[in-house]
C-alpha cells in the first residue's frame, strides 16, 4: 500500500482528536444538563410545597369536615399556572384530600411521609400513581406549630426528560457546529502542511533528512545558507573548517562572525557571485553564490589555498624562465658585440667589454649568494633582479641582508617577498624618482625580517592588504592580500612605512622544531 502523506495522517489524527473532544464535551454537557434539570425540579417542588403548606386557605381548610371541596379547586388552579404535575394534600394518616385524578382522592398516599410528620421535609424520586416523579412532602403547621396535615408536590420524570431533551438538542447543535469548524480548520492546516511537505510521508521525509545530513557532512565543499536578513541558517562541517568556526554558527548574523568585510559584502550582495577569490586569515577561497527565491541565498566555498600557492610558485618559475630568456637574449647581444670587436681587430676592447659584463653579472650573483643562504629566496632574488633589469628598475640587495636556511616554508617566503618586490617595481616605475627597489632579508635568533622599499609615490593605508584593493586599473588586488594572509598564517606582523616611497617590513617569528 502507498504510504499516507504526513498531511493526510495529521488530518485523520486531528479529526479523531476533534471528534473525541467534541463528543466528550457533548456527553459532559448532557450529564451536566441532566443534573441541573433534576436539581432545578427538586428546588421547584420544595418551594411550591412550602408555599402551599403555608397558605392560610390550606391551614384553615385541613381542619374542616370537607377539606376536599376547598382544596381540590385551589390546588388545580396552582397546578395550572406552574410546571407541577401533581399537588396532593393529605391528613396525618396519609389520606388524600386532593389529587389530579379525582378517583384517587380519599385513598392512601403512596410514598414516604415520616420526616414530614416529624416536622421535616421529604425530597425523593418515587413511583406513585402517575409514575416515577421527583417529589417533596412538607408539613402543614397550626398556629401552635403542630402538624395538621401534609402537602406533596411532584414533577414526573417524563416531564423532566422532555425539558432535558430540549437542552440536548441545543448541545447536539453546538457540538455539531464545533465539529464542523474544527474539521474545516483541520483541513486548511492539513492543506498547508501538504503544500509545505509536497505531499510526502514521514518515512520519505525521514529518508530525505538523513540523505541531506549525510551529504552535508560528506561533501568537501563548504555550504552556507543565508536568509534575506543576513542570518546563517545552515553551515556544514566543511564550511566551518574553511571559515575557521570552532562552534556551530546557525542562527547568527553573518556580519557578527568576524569574517573579512569583502567576503561578507560579496555574499550579502543582491546579484550572483561566480568564482570570486576571497581570503581569510588562513585560506584562499573560491566563492560562488546564487539566490533561492525569497528564502535567501546558497553560498559554496572551495579551498583554493594550495592551488593559489602552486600558482604563485608557477609564476615564480615563469619569472625565472623569463629572466633566463632575457639573460640569454642579452648574452647573445653581448656575444655578437664581442665577435664584432674581434673581427674589427679590436681584441683589447673585446676583452675589456667581456670582462666588465662578466664582473657585473658575477658581482650580483656573488652578492645574492653571499647574503642569502636560503636557496628558494636566492633563486627568487636572482630572477627578480634580472626582471628588474629588463624593466629598467634598479634592484638593490642592502648590505645588512644575511639569511641562511630557515624552518619557514619556502612557499610562504616566495609569496611574501615575490609579491612585495612585484608591487615595489610597479610603484617605482610610476614614481618621480629613478626607479629603484631596495630589498633587505635578515635572520636573527628569533625572527626573519623582510623589508622592501621603493621610490614610488608611497602608500598611507593598510587597506592595501585587503582583497580587492589595488592602485592598478583592472587588477583584482590579490597580491598584497596574499602577503597579509601568509604573514598572519605564520603568526607574523607587517608594517607599512614611508621613506622616498613605500616601505614594507615583515617580521616572521621562527618556530623551533622539536628534536
Image (cartoon, helix red, strand yellow):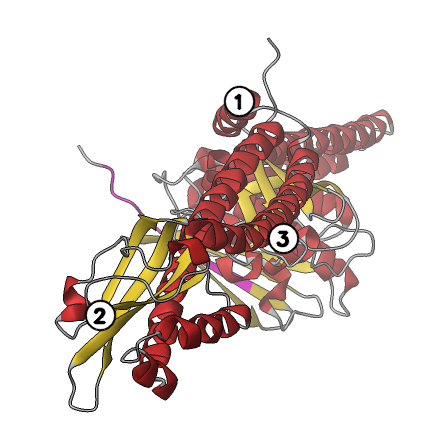
Furthest residue in direction top, as rendered? 1
- Image coords of residue 419 (percent x, y): 61, 48
Q: Name the residue located 39 percent from the left edge and 70 percent from the top edge.
A: 68
Furthest residue in direction left, as rendered? 118
Confirm or deny contact between disc 1 and disc 2 (CB under 8 A). no
Marks 3 and 2, Cα distance to the nearest angstrom?
92 Å
Bounds of the magenta segment:
504-513
Q: Which mark is residue 211?
A: 1
Please identify, in this view, whether the residue under mark 1 or under mark 2 is nearer the observer.
2
Which quadrant of the structure image shows residue 55? bottom left
Look at the picture and state if 50 lies above or below 436. Answer: below
Q: Residues within 10 Å of mark 2 (few under 14, many from 20)?
A: many
Residue nearest the observer in this picture, 347 or 432: 432
- Image coords of residue 165 (percent x, y): 54, 50
Image quarter where the N terminus lies is top right
Say if the magenta span includes residue 505.
yes
Please identify, in this view, whether the residue under mark 1 or under mark 3 is nearer the observer.
1
Quick check: 459 left or right of 239? right
Q: Does any portion of residue 51 appear in the rendered image?
A: yes
Q: Which mark is residue 263?
A: 3
Q: Which residue is mark 2?
A: 121
Amino acid at each position: 500500500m502507498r504510504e499516507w502523506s504526513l498531511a493526510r495522517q495529521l488530518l485523520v489524527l486531528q479529526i479523531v482528536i476533534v471528534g473525541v473532544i467534541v463528543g466528550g464535551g457533548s456527553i459532559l454537557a448532557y450529564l451536566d444538563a441532566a443534573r441541573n434539570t433534576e436539581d432545578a425540579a427538586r428546588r421547584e417542588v420544595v418551594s411550591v410545597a412550602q408555599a402551599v403548606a403555608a397558605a392560610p386557605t390550606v391551614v384553615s381548610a385541613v381542619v374542616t369536615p370537607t377539606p376536599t371541596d376547598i382544596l381540590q379547586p385551589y390546588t388545580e388552579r396552582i397546578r395550572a399556572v406552574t410546571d407541577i404535575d401533581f399537588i396532593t394534600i393529605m391528613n396525618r394518616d396519609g389520606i388524600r384530600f386532593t389529587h389530579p385524578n379525582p378517583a384517587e382522592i380519599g385513598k392512601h398516599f403512596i410514598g414516604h411521609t415520616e420526616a414530614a410528620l416529624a416536622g421535616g421535609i421529604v425530597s425523593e424520586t418515587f413511583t406513585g400513581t402517575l409514575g416515577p416523579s421527583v417529589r417533596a412532602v412538607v408539613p402543614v403547621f397550626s398556629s401552635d406549630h403542630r402538624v395538621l396535615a401534609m402537602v406533596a408536590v411532584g414533577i414526573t420524570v417524563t416531564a423532566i426528560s422532555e425539558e432535558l431533551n430540549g437542552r440536548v438538542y441545543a448541545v447536539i447543535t453546538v457540538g455539531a457546529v464545533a465539529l464542523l469548524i474544527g474539521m474545516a480548520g483541520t483541513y486548511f492546516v492539513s492543506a498547508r502542511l501538504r503544500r509545505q511537505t509536497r505531499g510526502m510521508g514521514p518515512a520519505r521525509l525521514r529518508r530525505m533528512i538523513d540523505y541531506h545530513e549525510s551529504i552535508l557532512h560528506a561533501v568537501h565543499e563548504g555550504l552556507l545558507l543565508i536568509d534575506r536578513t543576513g542570518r546563517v541558517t545552515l553551515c556544514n562541517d566543511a564550511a566551518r573548517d574553511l571559515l575557521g568556526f570552532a562552534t556551530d554558527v546557525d542562527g547568527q548574523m553573518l556580519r557578527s562572525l568576524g569574517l573579512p568585510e569583502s567576503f561578507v559584502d560579496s555574499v550579502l550582495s543582491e546579484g550572483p557571485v561566480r568564482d570570486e577569490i576571497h581570503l581569510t586569515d588562513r585560506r584562499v577561497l573560491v566563492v560562488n553564490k546564487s539566490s533561492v527565491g525569497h528564502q535567501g541565498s546558497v553560498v559554496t566555498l572551495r579551498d583554493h589555498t594550495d592551488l593559489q600557492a602552486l600558482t604563485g610558485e608557477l609564476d615564480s618559475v615563469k619569472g625565472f624562465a623569463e629572466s633566463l630568456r632575457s639573460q640569454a637574449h642579452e648574452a647573445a647581444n653581448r656575444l655578437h658585440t664581442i665577435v664584432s670587436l674581434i673581427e674589427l681587430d679590436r681584441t683589447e676592447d673585446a676583452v675589456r667589454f667581456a670582462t666588465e659584463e662578466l664582473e657585473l653579472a658575477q658581482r650580483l650573483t656573488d652578492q645574492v649568494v653571499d647574503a642569502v643562504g636560503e636557496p628558494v629566496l636566492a633563486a627568487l632574488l636572482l630572477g627578480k633582479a634580472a626582471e628588474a633589469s629588463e624593466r629598467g628598475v634598479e634592484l638593490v640587495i642592502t648590505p645588512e641582508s644575511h639569511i641562511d636556511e630557515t624552518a619557514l616554508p619556502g612557499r610562504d617566503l616566495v609569496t611574501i617577498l615575490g609579491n612585495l618586490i612585484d608591487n615595489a617595481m610597479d610603484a617605482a616605475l610610476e614614481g618621480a624618482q629613478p626607479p629603484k627597489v631596495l630589498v633587505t632579508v635578515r635572520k636573527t635568533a628569533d625572527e626573519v625580517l623582510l623589508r622592501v622599499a621603493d621610490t614610488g609615490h608611497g602608500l598611507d593605508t593598510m587597506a592595501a592588504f585587503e582583497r580587492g584593493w589595488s592602485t592598478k586599473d583592472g587588477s583584482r588586488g590579490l597580491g598584497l592580500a596574499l602577503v597579509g594572509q601568509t604573514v598572519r598564517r605564520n603568526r607574523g606582523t607587517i608594517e607599512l612605512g614611508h621613506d622616498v616611497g613605500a616601505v614594507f617590513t615583515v617580521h616572521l617569528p621562527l618556530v623551533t622544531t622539536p628534536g
